[in-house]
Image (cartoon, rainbow, N blue to C red):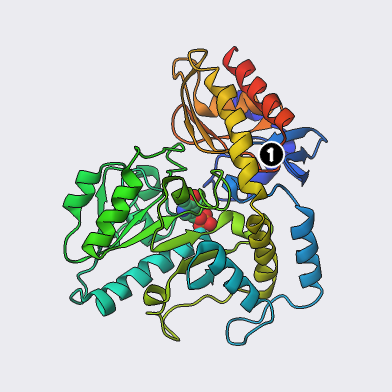
Amino acid sequence: MIEDMLRTPAAVQDAERHTAHNYHPLPVVISSAEGAWVTDVDGRRYLDCLAGYSALNFGHRHPTLIAAAHAQLDRLTLTSRAFIHDQFADFCRELAALCGKDLVLPMNTGAEAVETGIKVARKWGYQVKGVPAGQANIVVAEGNFHGRTTTIVSFSTDEDARADFGPYTPGFRIVPYGDLAALTAAIDEHTVAVLLEPIQGEQGVVVPPEGYLPGVRQLCTERNVLFIADEIQSGLGRTGTTFACELDGVVPDMYLLGKALGGGIVPVSAVAADADVLGVLKPGQHGSTFGGNPLACAVATEVVRLLATGEFQRRSAELGERLHAGLRALLGKGLVAVRGRGLWVGLDIDPALMSGREACERLMERGVLAKDTHGSTIRLAPPLVITEAEIDHAVAQVAAVLAG
Ligand SMILES: *Cc1c(COP(=O)(O)O)cnc(C)c1O
């Protein structure tokens, strides 16, 4: 510990002094960034292989997004939803079209999108499905990560995320991820929704077994239950498709979006669904002061337009192949598992070798930023603007770290 402190630069200690210690950041202090690269206060450059947990899918300061933000800052930044502003219609129409849904409901953070999805599903359950008052339940998966609010941590299976934050919100049933039989058994006549990540990001980029998501879709349709896909981390190009659900040819009833939707500039989240679902909300029943604000809409509309070209999804699919192939070559050389889709990989390091944290510290010393998830698992999720040469560089640094 003392040794740690001695090695810790002053700028790192400064940053930790007056904040709650709810994070354990890598000891790097970043002061500027562009594309896939960040620079620290001492001028050292690092390849960003976390990309803000996928909030930076388009890289740092994508010129189109920065230009949109600048232009909007000079015109109008906030109105609240009490009034309508001129950036709102385009954003909602274009995002709904990207999602193939009738309507969107803009919020700010991912957790708010999840909370919105839960509220909409419950109201739909009472008003459309006919569930008796107060009886609605929602089925979720073990190992989920949906955010940090009191309701969301109520159905977390991660003790760190959940312990000592009760009393917990009732109305959730937890089943093993990837287990269709367990899901089938958990659904009853009061079930209003199944809420899942199509790939579990925080759990270590866990891809469900083949056939699982189509099975969930079929089950939800048969039992008149909403399938809510939390695509906050998996969506918007990360997996080589606009939505991870597409990889399995599945269309959920509701998409929860966030992270990359804000273009790495502002927090923007949204729920997208058809009118028979989102239409249950009437004035006064839900809202957010900052949700759908002009700056957020101006940036997010450009995000949707970038995605509408398909270029980023293509890059993620093609470059993802290269990243996966490079890392799979390290299986047996310190790696015990490589999972994921597109430019999104969970790596299990041989626990006898080092922890995920240690691996990330060593990668940092080699100029690559990544983040451990649990134990010896680390996640790589570089910006989708990363190049082939940069991927090879990242893989070479992982190899060097594993080789000691
Ligand atoms: C990050 C994340 C959230 C929460 O988003 P915040 O913006 O941090 O509230 C929810 N679901 C998933 C899958 C996420 O990765």
In front of the other: 165 or 116: 116
In front of the other: 103 or 168: 103
Q: Where is residue 86 in the image (x, y as percent from the top left)?
A: 69, 81
Residue 257 horizontal side relative to residue 126, left or right: right
Q: Position of residue 295 (x, y in %)?
A: 69, 70
Q: Position of residue 404 (x, y in %)?
A: 60, 12
Q: Mark 1 points at which residue?
A: 12
Residue 294 appears in the picture as rendered: yes
In front of the other: 211 or 23: 211
Q: How many labels does the image show?
A: 1
Task: Kindly indicate the quadrant of the structure image that contains residue 369.
Answer: top right
Residue 282 horizontal side relative to residue 22, left or right: left
Task: Kindly indicate the quadrant of the structure image that contains residue 190.
Answer: bottom left
Instruction: Determine if the C-beta at disc 1 is less than 8 A from ligand 1.
Output: no
Which residue is depicted at the point 52% across and 31% down?
378
Q: What element carries label 1?
A: helix
Which residue is depicted at the point 54% across and 48% down?
241
- Work out whether 112 lies above or below 341: below
Which residue is depicted at the point 19% across and 70% down?
135
Which residue is depicted at the point 48% across and 67% down?
272
Q: Where is residue 29 in the image (x, y as percent from the top left)?
A: 72, 40
Residue 51 appears in the picture as rendered: no
Mark 1 neighbour class, 10 Å CA radius: few under 14, some 14 to 19, many 20 or more: some
Amino acid type, mark 1: Val
Residue 321 horizontal side relative to residue 188, left or right: right
Please state, as top left, top right, bottom left or bottom right, where the N terminus lies in the image. top right
- Work out whether 129 lies above or below 173: below
- Work out whether 347 lies above or below 230: above
